[in-house]
Amino acid sequence: MALAIAVVFGVVIGSFLNVVIRRLPEGNSIIRPRSHCPNCKRLIRWYDNVPILSYFLLGGRCRQCNRKISIRYPLVEALSGIVGLLMYDKFGLGIEWVIFFSFSAALIVLAFIDLDHRILPDPITLNGIWVGILASVYLAQPSSLAVRLLRTIGLETTNSRVIALTASLLGVFIGGGLLWGVGEAYFRLRGIEGMGFGDVKMMAMVGALLGAPLALLTILIGSLLGVVIGLLYIRVAGKSRQYELPFGTFLAAAGIVVVLYGDEFINWYIDRIIQPSL
Ligand SMILES: [Zn+2]
C-alpha cells in the first residue's frame, strides 16, 4: 500500500513537473491557466489529463486538433514514478522520502530545462540551497557521510544539529566551489565556456542537502556521464566539437543516482579499496 502511494504520488508530481519544465523558463505562472494544448490552445479535459494513461488512450495525439503530443510528457511522469519507488525502497514512506523525493524532483526539472534551454533557473537552485540547508539541519542524520567525516577529523560537539549545519554549509561551498574550479580549468584548457554559473549554484544546492563528499561524487559521475554520452552524441549527431552540452542535465542525473546509491558506493569503496591497501 505504502509502495503504491509512493509510485502514484511520484507519477502525479511528474505531471506537475512537466508543467514547471515548460512554463518556468517562459516566465509563465505554473499554477494558472490550466493545461492546454500548445497547438490549438484549447483546455485539456481532466479525463484527458491523467498521467501516463491518457497519453496512450489518446494514441499520443490531442483529442481536439489531432496534433502529436510529445512522448516526453509520459516519460517524465514515468521517471518521476520510478524515482518515487526507488526512494521508497531506500527511505520508506516518511519525512525522508518527502525531502529526498522533492530534491530529486527539483533535479528532474533542472535536467530538462537545461536540456531545452541551457539554463538552470535561479528560483530552483537558489531556493534549493536554503531549503537544502534547513532540511539537512532538520534531518541531522548521524549516519550521513559528511557528518561522520567531520567527527573523524575532530569536530566534537554533542549537538547533532550544529554538526549537520556545518556539514551542510561546507557542502554548499565545496560543492559549488569545486564545480567553479572545474569550469575555470575547462575554460583555460579549451578557451570556451564549458558551463555557466547556474551549474555552480546547482552544485551548491546538491552540497547543501548531501554534504561535500556526496557533492564531489556527483560532480565525478556527472562529468563522466557528460564526457561519455556527450562526446558520443556529438559523434553520432555530427555536431561540432564546440557544441554546448547540457552539463546540468548530467549533474542532475548523477545527483539522483548519488542520493540512492552514493553512501553505499563510498562505504564499499572505503572497505574494499582503501582499507585493504593500508
Ligand atoms: Zn490541440
Image (tube, rainbow, N blue to C red):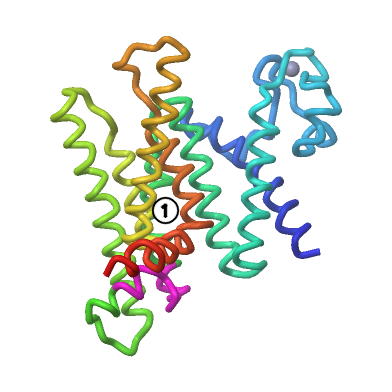
Taking the image as shown, residue 266 lies to the left or right of residue 169, namely right
In percent of the image, x 85 and y 35: which residue is there? 47
Query: Is 115 on the left or on the right of 214, as rendered?
Result: right
Q: Quadrant of residue 71?
A: top right
Locate ligand 1 by image quadrant.
Answer: top right
Between 236 and 191, the one lying in front of the other is 236
Query: At 35% from the left edge and 75% from the top edge, which residue is drawn?
Result: 148
The image shows residue 255, relative to residue 235, as above or below, that is below
Q: Residue 163, how many percent across, how many down?
A: 32, 77
Which quadrant is home to the C terminus?
A: bottom left
Q: Secondary structure at mark 1?
A: helix
Q: Residue furthest left?
A: 188
Residue at 72% in and 16% down:
68
The amino acid pointed to by label 1 is Gly
Majority SS type along the magenta span:
helix
Picture coordinates of residue 153, whole percent (x, y)? 23, 77
Taking the spot 39% from the left edge, 47% from the top edge, the residue there is 125
Q: Residues within 10 Å of mark 1 (few under 14, many from 20)?
A: many
- Name the residue beneath numbered marker 1: 128
| Frontmost residue, 83 versus 123 | 83
Find residue 145 and report its horizontal and vertical position in percent: 38, 69
Q: Farthest residue in the front direction?
A: 277
Q: Is residue 148 magenta?
A: yes
Residue 132 covered by magenta stretch: no
Task: Give, as a single range, the part of the protein colored magenta.
Answer: 136-149
